[in-house]
Image: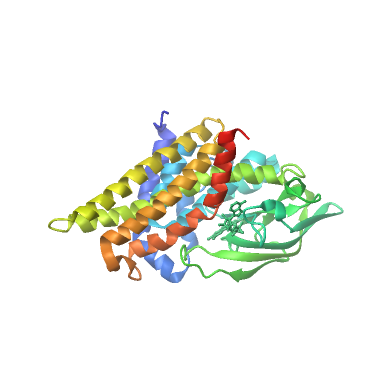
């Protein structure tokens, strides 16, 4: 594996570090206000971080997945809520660049690159791990499609310029799913609930109702019936983003432990052992994540490696945040403490973009060659 960055990748990483330094002091205020201000995403857009893998002629940075992964870790180590929005918008930009028509690409990719948000509306009540159970339907009406149903747990679904919405067009199972680009201000698209979550409190997670949302036939993304394939390809890449996010959250906790132990006259052996475990896990996680990123960047198959990276890294990050709480003691869990925030933020990384159980199914099947 050659993980050296080219000039574009170096520039992305440098700008991500600058953004991390600017964001870190603001993250607690974002959490208290339960909002990341829109200007943050415009700043990230100007820094080239909202469409890292999107080609330059569509307004993206055209940098590789390794640079994206490193940048995501930097941003997540400052603010995990900002990072999840960055991750989903990058994923949406890549999906549109990969599957969109020329018209769709030109309509949306430059806007996402500039810091408008893209949402990914796949999950429903009863269709989380298994999108095949989806009930949102799209019916053809003349030259239009009319979408009816509901979506659950949609990150920044209340402030997206565009949502990639999955709906059933053709019979049961995963083969009947198609994918549509729906503008955030579409008529009959409503936010029905905002979740009150343990972590990622500055990232809005919403339930959406589609009460007959009408879109033109040109809003179909990819081919009719091709929605499941698009979802799986998007999630493979998205898993690298979430592994990188989890790593960033745990890195922030590790930094707090290091500062705490350095300030002590003589740290206890047990604390040093925990710190050693944290660093060992996070180093292994980093390498697994970069391996998946490197394979994706080279255009090789990376499904298994992305799932390995996601399952291992998110669990390592969770265990590491837990160890840091043990090292710091109760002060770590005081409201407003950065470790308290990391501890609450990291948990969801084991759930979204496919739970740990789902990753293990993907890995197990891939190992068997099934
Ligand atoms: C903060 C947050 C943000 C999110 N953002 C988005 C978003 O932007 N877009 C979007 O579409 N979704 C989003 N989601 C939804 C997320 O992807 C789903 O929650 C996740 O896929 C799990 O689905 P579920 O909650 O329906 O759980 P279920 O699928 O009902 O699973 C429940 C439990 O059963 C386990 N399980 C399920 N199937 C199997 C199996 N075959 N074998 C073994 N165990 C199994 C799961 O691992 C889990 O532990 C978000 C979720 C959260 C919490």
Name which quarter of the figure residue 135 lies in.
Answer: bottom right
Residue furthest out toward the front? 368
Does the image show residue 52? Answer: no
Residue 336: image x %, image y %? 35, 69
Q: Quadrant of ligand 1?
A: bottom right
Q: Nearer the viewer, residue 48 or 202?
A: 202
Say if 269 sits above or below 150 in the image.
Answer: above
Return the x and y of residue 291 as percentages of the image width and height: 45, 35
Q: Nearer the viewer, residue 195 or 126?
A: 126
| Most foreground residue, 268 or 102 | 268
Which quadrant is home to the N terminus? Answer: top left
- Left or right: 329 in relation to 226: left
Q: Position of residue 271 (x, y in %)?
A: 23, 55
Q: Is residue 326 left or right of residue 50?
A: left
Q: Which quadrant: the C terminus?
A: top right
* Numbered disc total: 0
The extreme right residue here reads 142
Q: Where is residue 14 drawn, in percent x and y? A: 37, 43
Q: Nearer the viewer, residue 159 or 176?
A: 176
Q: Is residue 226 visible?
A: yes
- Coloration mode: rainbow
Residue 307 is left or right of residue 332, and the answer is: right
User: Within the image, what quadrant is residue 224 found in?
Assistant: top right
Residue at x 52% of width, y 43% of height: 307
- Seen at 35% across and 71% down, the residue is 335
Tell me the residue at 55%/40% (across/down).
363
């Amino acid at each position: 594996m050659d993980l050296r960055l080219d000039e574009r990748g170096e520039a992305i990483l440098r700008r991500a570090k600058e953004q991390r330094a600017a964001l870190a002091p603001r993250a607690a205020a974002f959490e208290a206000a339960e909002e990341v201000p829109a200007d943050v995403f415009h700043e990230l857009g100007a820094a080239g971080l909202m469409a890292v893998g999107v080609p330059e002629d569509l307004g993206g940075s055209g940098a590789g997945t390794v640079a994206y992964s490193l940048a995501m870790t930097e941003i997540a180590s400052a603010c995990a809520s900002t990072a999840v929005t960055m991750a989903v918008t990058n994923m949406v930009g890549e999906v549109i660049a990969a599957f969109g028509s020329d018209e769709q690409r030109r309509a949306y990719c430059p806007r996402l690159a500039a810091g408008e948000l893209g949402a990914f509306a796949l999950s429903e009540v009863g269709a989380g791990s298994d999108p095949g159970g989806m009930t949102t339907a799209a019916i053809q009406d003349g030259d239009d499609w009319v979408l009816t149903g509901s979506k659950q747990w949609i990150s920044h679904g209340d402030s997206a310029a565009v949502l990639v919405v999955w709906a059933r067009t053709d019979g049961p199972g995963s083969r009947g799913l198609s994918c549509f680009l729906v503008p955030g201000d579409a008529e009959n698209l409503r936010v029905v609930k905002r979740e009150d979550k343990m972590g990622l409190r500055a990232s809005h997670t919403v339930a959406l109702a589609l009460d007959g949302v009408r879109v033109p036939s040109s809003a179909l993304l990819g081919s009719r019936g091709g929605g499941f394939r698009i979802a799986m390809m998007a999630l493979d890449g998205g898993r690298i983003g979430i592994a990188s996010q989890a790593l960033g959250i745990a890195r922030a906790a590790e930094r707090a432990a290091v500062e705490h132990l350095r300030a002590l006259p003589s740290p206890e052996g047990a604390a040093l052992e925990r710190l050693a475990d944290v660093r060992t896990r996070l180093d292994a996680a980093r390498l697994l994540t970069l391996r998946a990123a490197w394979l994706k960047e080279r255009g090789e198959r990376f499904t298994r490696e992305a799932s390995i990276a996601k399952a291992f890294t998110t669990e390592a990050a969770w265990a590491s945040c837990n160890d840091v709480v043990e090292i710091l003691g109760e002060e770590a869990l005081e409201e407003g403490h950065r470790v308290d925030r990391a501890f609450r933020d990291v948990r969801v990384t084991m759930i979204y973009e496919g739970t740990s159980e789902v990753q293990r199914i993907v890995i197990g099947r891939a190992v068997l060659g099934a």
